[in-house]
Image (cartoon, rainbow, N blue to C red):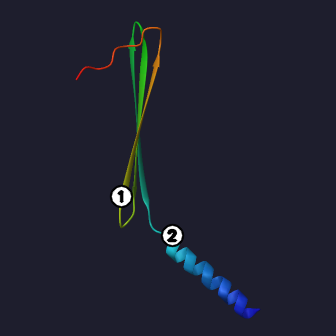
Amino acid sequence: MKKLVHLSVACIVGVATIGCEPKATTEKKTETTVTTPGGETKTTVEQKVETTPDSATRTTTEKVETTGDNPPPAAKP
């Protein structure tokens, strides 16, 4: 019985040590609303950066919502 308890504790400590990598997360959210006589366009951009000692993962999500009968024209480059 003692061996089983010691083995269980050793497994938990080992998994906790390996699985707990320090991680920092930064999030930024920007919303822009353009209103015209024919409708409204709302653009939401979310940026998320997860950083660990070995790597960094950057995720960007853009969502565009258009309302109205005559939506505004797309921006010209």
Residue at the far left in the pictured view: 77
Helix, strand, or loop for circle 1? strand
| Residue 21 in picture, x, y percent from top left | 46, 68
Q: Disc 2 designates what residue? A: 20
Q: Amino acid at mark 1?
A: Ala
Residue at the far right in the pictured view: 1
| Residue 44 in picture, x, y percent from top left | 42, 31
| Residue 60 in picture, x, y percent from top left | 39, 42
What numbered label is drawn on residue 56? 1
Say whether residue 26 is left or right of residue 18: left
Say whether residue 74 is left or right of residue 18: left
- Mark 2 crowdedness (10 Å alpha carbons): few <14, some 14-19, many ≥20: few
Q: Earlier in the sequence, mark 2 or mark 1?
A: 2
Helix, strand, or loop for circle 2? loop
Residue at image position (37%, 13%) is: 72
| Residue 73 in picture, x, y percent from top left | 34, 14
Question: Is the residue 42 above or below the residue 26 in the image?
Answer: above
Residue at image position (43%, 15%) is: 40
